[in-house]
């Protein structure tokens, strides 16, 4: 591992010959800038958790980078083999903790597919609305925090302030701000509370206004553009072969969104929405794409509220859930990218094997390639613009 | 989404005699290829068929987990069948590697898997085809002990470098469950709305 390599330091015995050249060194300024190894993290404000990044520097330039992950590894793939299906949703809430609700959906969906049941339309609509609300909450934090990484404090406050409105909505509906655990196999735990729909309409206005503010304050800012344009470029084809997904891949010009292009899930086929791409693939375009997607999500929530059907929120499911033998792969477009569960069942009350495909893991695996040749201050903006959650890398 | 029948025939035609078996996992095509054609299959999938996106590479251990150290009456661990059965497309033995690749242009995906020998778990590496395979294979190596031949540096990803054992193998015990009884045992709450299992407390 590169961590064991230390920069060579001179001992106490100094060769007298070195002093002879001291005078030369004053005149011919040719200092030896040997490679330096810089350790960023595990605690670093730009990393949303405990990511350690070992970078080898030549002066100000990174010549090699090695992300060291695993500080938060909780072994969820093993733990799922010791849990029943309803218990697993509690665990997977904690994978991507900024959009926990969106994490539950593909797993519950996989179990429903294997059991051949389908949640009623109202439950599907509420699930979609809450998924989009998690996306808005996640992206609002990004939109503010990305400003922070280039030295602008104000957007961070706006981001946190406006996200709070959305979190309040999620809390009102599910009872949990961050870990709702609201999905049940076959539907949802509860129906929406009174007044939630009208309150959500108000908040969506706040969100749309906030997007305009970020557009003026951050996207139009000269310093922000100087720090992000043409920095941290991911070519689309390379990004795909690394498994980079979601907004990061769309910012590289790949027109691929599982809500539109994947197997139909939730209420997305009923919605009218636009998928945004950007040809540049740099940090700026990743910010721009997420900003547009926040707006689009707010519009989708409004559409969902208008079309919300009446009816039950739970399908008829047996009290003890036994999932028939089989395999299912369900993938969804989560705020951070493609999230998927490969569930293997052997007819028991718990899964036999669950492969959790989380978005940030693959998004971050491109870092050794991306960081080669960039300057140290840009490392932070690149990390921030990739937007990963450590729980989503380490699982 | 491409038509699934044409997609299946396109893939099986292109892979040719590498295909051992095929199946379907709830709408997803699963293809089992010969172990010696693991890397060349990836090559065909990416270069010829346009599956440009690597979703994941993972291992699976089909052996039933040995039931040890459980306190009597502990129902916290879901009981799995005690005989070894294989999933879609079958398997020659205990270990398999499976991967999911997708096409961002055709909006289609396929799961490929291959058998791994238990005595000498070796698989060809995909890093030269999909660079993103690097981390997935490191994870698979430490969790299952599969050696990916041709991988540039197989070293620990999640676990500390001195860690011994392969945690996701079924015979690796989850010690937290064995040293201490499941807390749910002492705190049993009757199910609401009566119970259909006679003799259970709380159903007076």
Image (cartoon, helix red, strand yellow):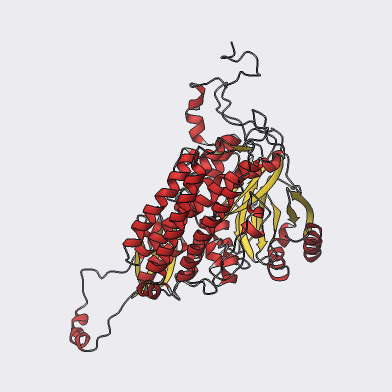
Q: How many marks?
A: 0
In which quadrant will I find the C terminus of chain B?
top right
How far from the left and from the top, in percent, is residue A17? 21, 82
User: Is residue A45 among the parts visible in the rendering?
Assistant: no
How far from the left and from the top, in percent, is residue B98? 66, 53
Q: Residue at x 72, y 63 (%)?
A: B41
Q: Nearer the viewer, residue B58 or A272?
A: A272
Q: Is residue A118 above or below residue A391?
A: above
Q: Nearer the viewer, residue B5 or A57?
A: B5
How far from the left and from the top, in percent, is residue A331? 62, 52
Q: Is A262 left or right of A334, judged from the image as shown? A: right
User: Is residue A227 among the parts visible in the rendering?
Assistant: yes
Q: Nearer the viewer, residue B177 or A208?
A: A208
Q: Is A25 left or right of A106, judged from the image as shown? A: left
In which quadrant will I find the N terminus of chain B?
bottom right
How far from the left and from the top, in percent, is residue A141? 41, 56
Q: Is A117 left or right of B180, judged from the image as shown? A: right
Q: Is A318 left or right of B162, judged from the image as shown? A: right
Q: Residue at x 69, y 43 (%)?
A: A113
Q: Is residue A379 above or below residue B201?
A: below
Which quarter of the picture shows residue B113?
Answer: bottom right
Which quarter of the picture shows residue A300?
Answer: bottom right
Outermost residue on the top side: it is B204
Q: Nearer the viewer, residue A261 or B161?
A: A261
């Amino acid at each position: 591992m590169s961590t064991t390599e230390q920069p060579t330091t001179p001992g106490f015995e100094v060769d007298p010959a070195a002093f002879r050249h001291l005078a030369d060194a004053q005149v011919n300024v040719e200092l030896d800038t040997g490679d330096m190894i810089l350790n960023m993290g595990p605690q670093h404000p730009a990393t949303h958790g405990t990511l350690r990044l070992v970078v080898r520097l030549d002066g100000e330039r990174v010549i090699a980078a090695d992300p060291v992950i695993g500080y938060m590894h909780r072994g969820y793939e093993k733990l799922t083999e010791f849990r029943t299906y309803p218990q697993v949703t509690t665990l997977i809430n904690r994978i991507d903790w900024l959009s926990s609700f969106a994490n539950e959906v593909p797993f519950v969906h996989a179990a429903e597919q294997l059991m051949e049941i389908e949640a009623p339309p109202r439950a599907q609509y509420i699930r979609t609305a809450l998924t989009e609300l998690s996306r808005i909450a996640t992206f609002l934090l990004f939109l503010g925090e990305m400003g922070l990484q280039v030295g602008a404090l104000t957007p961070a406050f706006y981001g946190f302030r406006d996200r709070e409105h959305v979190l309040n909505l999620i809390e009102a509906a599910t009872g949990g701000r961050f870990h709702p655990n609201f999905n049940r196999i076959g539907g949802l735990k509860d129906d929406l509370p009174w007044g939630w729909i009208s309150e959500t309409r108000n908040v969506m206005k706040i969100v749309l206004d906030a997007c305009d503010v970020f557009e003026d304050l951050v996207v139009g800012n000269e310093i922000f553009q100087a720090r992000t344009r043409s920095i941290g470029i991911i070519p689309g084809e390379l990004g795909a072969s690394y498994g980079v997904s979601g907004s990061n891949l769309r910012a590289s010009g790949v027109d691929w969104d599982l809500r539109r292009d994947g197997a139909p899930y939730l209420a997305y086929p009923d919605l009218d929405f636009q998928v945004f791409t950007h040809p540049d693939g740099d940090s700026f375009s990743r910010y721009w794409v997420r900003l547009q997607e926040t707006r689009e999500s707010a519009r989708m929530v409004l559409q969902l509220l208008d079309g919300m059907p009446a009816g039950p929120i739970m399908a008829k499911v047996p009290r003890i859930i036994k999932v028939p033998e089989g395999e299912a792969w369900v993938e969804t477009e989560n705020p951070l990218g493609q999230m998927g569960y490969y569930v293997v069942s052997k007819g028991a009350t718990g899964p036999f094997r669950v492969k959790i495909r989380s978005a940030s893991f693959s998004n971050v695996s491109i870092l050794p390639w991306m960081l080669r040749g960039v300057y140290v201050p840009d490392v932070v903006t690149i990390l921030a613009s990739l937007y990963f959650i450590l729980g989503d890398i380490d699982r | 989404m491409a038509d699934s029948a044409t997609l299946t025939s396109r893939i099986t035609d292109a892979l040719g005699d590498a295909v051992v078996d095929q199946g379907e996992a709830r709408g997803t095509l699963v293809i089992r290829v010969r172990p010696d054609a693991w890397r060349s299959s990836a090559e065909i999938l990416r270069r010829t068929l346009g599956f440009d996106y690597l979703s994941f590479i993972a291992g699976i251990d089909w052996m039933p987990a040995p039931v040890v150290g459980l306190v009597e009456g502990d129902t916290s661990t879901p009981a799995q069948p005690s005989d070894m059965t294989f999933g879609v497309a079958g398997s020659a033995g205990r270990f398999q590697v499976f991967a999911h690749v997708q096409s961002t242009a055709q909006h289609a995906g396929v799961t490929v898997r291959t058998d791994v020998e238990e005595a000498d778990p070796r698989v060809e590496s995909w890093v030269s085809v999909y660079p993103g395979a690097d981390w997935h294979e490191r994870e698979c190596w430490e969790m299952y002990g599969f050696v990916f031949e041709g991988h540039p540096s197989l070293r620990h990803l999640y676990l500390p470098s001195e860690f011994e054992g392969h945690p996701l193998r079924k015979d690796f015990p989850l010690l937290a469950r064995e040293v201490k009884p499941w807390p749910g045992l002492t705190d049993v709450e009757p199910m609401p709305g009566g119970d259909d299992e006679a003799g259970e407390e709380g159903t007076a």
